[in-house]
């Protein structure tokens, strides 16, 4: 696996950054279902899902955990 940087998966739900690092066997233009996504802005993580009928890849971000002050 290698790490590639993309800016087309959708904005991070935590900080709004549009760039993410993806751990994949693909490349900047071809990702796989389940690839690990890490936001370049805040480090928030998630994974890639593929919409089979298109096919279109998009980021599904992990649940945000609220921290009490």
Image (cartoon, rainbow, N blue to C red):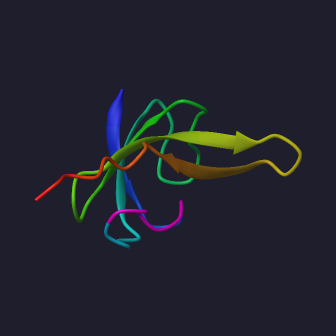
Query: Where does residue 1 sit, x and y in percent of width and height?
Result: 36, 26
Residue 49 x, y percent position in the rendering: 63, 40
Relative horizontal placement of residue 27, taking residue 5 as reference (left or right): right
Could you tell me which residue is drawn at 82 percent across and 40 percent down? 52
For the C terminus, the quadrant is bottom left
Q: Look at the image and say whether residue 10 sits in the magenta stretch.
A: yes
Total numbered labels placed on residues in the image: 0
Residue ID at (69%, 41%): 50
Q: Which residues are magenta?
A: 9-14
Please, which residue is most extreme toward the right here?
A: 53
Q: Position of residue 65 (x, y in %)?
A: 31, 47
Q: Looking at the image, which residue sits at the far left?
A: 69
45 shown above or below 20 = above
Residue 67 in percent (x, y) is at: 20, 52
- The correct choice, above or below, for 9 with respect to 59 in the image is below
Nearest the eye: 60 or 36: 60
Query: In the displayed structure, does residue 29 sit left or right of residue 56?
Result: left
The correct choice, above or below, for 38 with respect to 19 in the image is above
Determine if the magenta segment contains residue 35.
no
Towards the viewer: 43 or 53 = 43
| View extreme (top): residue | 1
């Amino acid at each position: 696996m290698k790490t590639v940087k993309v800016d087309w998966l959708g904005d991070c739900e935590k900080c709004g950054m549009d760039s993410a690092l993806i751990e994949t066997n693909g490349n900047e233009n071809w990702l796989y279902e389940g690839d690990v996504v890490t936001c370049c802005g805040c480090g928030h993580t998630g994974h890639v899902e593929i919409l089979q009928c298109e096919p279109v890849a998009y980021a599904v971000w992990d649940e945000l955990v609220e921290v009490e002050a």
